[in-house]
Image (spheres, rainbow, N blue to C red):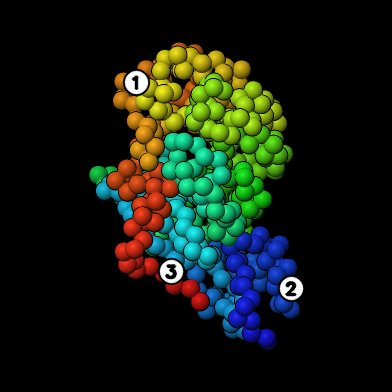
Amino acid sequence: MTPISQTQKKTDLLALTLPQLQQWLKDRGEAPFRAKQIYNWLYRQLETDFSAMSNLPQSLRQRLSEEACIGPTVIRSELHSKDDRTRKILLELSDGKLVESVLMLYPPLKESSSRATVCVSSQAGCAYGCTFCATGQMGFDRHLSAGEIVAQVLFFARELRTTPWTASGLPGSTPIDHITNIVLMGMGEPLHNYTNVLQALRILNSNDGFNLGARHMTVSTVGLVPAIRKLSQENLQINLAISLHAPTDELRSRTMPVNRKYPLAELLAACKDYIATTKRQVTFEYVLLSDVNDTAEYAEKLAELLAPLKQFAHVNCIPVNATSASYQTPGPDAIRAFRNILFERGISNSVRAERGDDIAAACGQLRTRFENSRKAPVVPVVTPQA
């Protein structure tokens, strides 16, 4: 067996579908059936150490340690909110780029069970420049690989497996020890990184691997019309969320430059076609900016815009997080008034609870703080791995 060259890059196994891993093994003269065993170790046992994969031959374990790796492993910062319902990591990639991931923990509510949702980044930075988004103010560095996307989910999966979470004040509730949902609403525009994002979702959805149901996955987009149309043709029942944030082209173009390329008429037409093809509801995310887009007039315009989609449209109202932009969060009365107008016009809506303000949970905030203080010494936390 020839050792890997010092200049040859190791293969990240988290970036490979099961058929790709089978081919990778076959190319090296190894038995393809070993791929399912490796997948079990990676996604069911959540193992990070090749030497612990006890049902693999010693020679294969040695080869894996020389030629493969299991995602990026350096955590530069991990913060927990005071109530421990929100946890955020700053993950350093192999080239030194930094991305953020957030775990949001929800206690059981009425008939619903506890949830553990990972908010995943798909890019380092973002090319779309939305004015209210900390990531959008950074500019674009690069796409993340499928393995770098998958690694974010597995980090929190391992954490919950090791220490299941129970909400304080609910001692009788069943602890949650696994990830139940993922949302691609972290740093970057997921549909700009279409190929790698879809690859990651298929890996996480695989019955032989992480086995997370597609209906528990949500992809958010600023409104890349061709990619929305392409997504409607995928055989994957994921949820689609549109970052809308304004019901007129004039206002949306001011806060979201992408609207100049794909104005509202084109975006809504793509959403109608998506709904017709998939028969699935679309969520419209609406960041509420005090005295900018949260007035009664804009609530009426939003209801009018979405009325043709009927029951297939749902609005998620999101009070803006404070970033380096000068936007203010609306008060509870303004939020309630905005939502009531939508309800009166027959538009389903909800409001996202503020999460993790004490740990800079909004996209890009932790990376910005970290880079601003990078001159200070930082001790990395490294996940054990062969």
Name the residue tied to disc 3: 383
Q: Earlier in the sequence, mark 3 or mark 1?
A: 1
Q: Amino acid at mark 2?
A: Lys
Instruction: Determine whether the residue tagged by mark 3 lies in a helix, strand or loop.
Output: loop
Hey, which residue is sitting farthest bottom in the picture? Answer: 1
Mark 2 vs mark 3: give the one in front.
3
According to the picture, the residue beneath numbered tag 2 turns out to be 26
Q: Are marks 2 and 1 in contact (CB under 8 Å)?
A: no
The location of residue 337, given as percent across then percent down, is 37, 17
224 to 291, vertically: above or below: below
Residue beneath disc 1: 334
Mark 2 or mark 1, earlier in chain: 2
Q: Position of residue 302 (x, y in %)?
A: 51, 19
Distance from the alpha carbon under mark 2 to that under mark 1:
61 Å
Residue at screen point 42% across, 15% down: 296
Taking 222 as reference, is 115 left or right?
left
Marks 3 and 1 close (CB-CB < 8 Å): no
Which residue is painted at 44% across and 31% down in the image?
287
Give the CA distance from mark 3 to mark 1: 45 Å
Residue 202: where, in percent of width, then height? 63, 52
Which of the numbered marks, if any, corresponds to residue 34?
Answer: none
Q: Amino acid at mark 1?
A: Ala
Q: CA distance from mark 2 to mark 3?
A: 29 Å
In-image side of 23 versus 312 (left or right): right
State the image quarter where residue 1 is shown: bottom right
Mark 3 or 1, which is nearer the eye? 1
From where the camera sits, is residue 78 visible?
A: no
Q: Secondary structure at mark 1?
A: helix
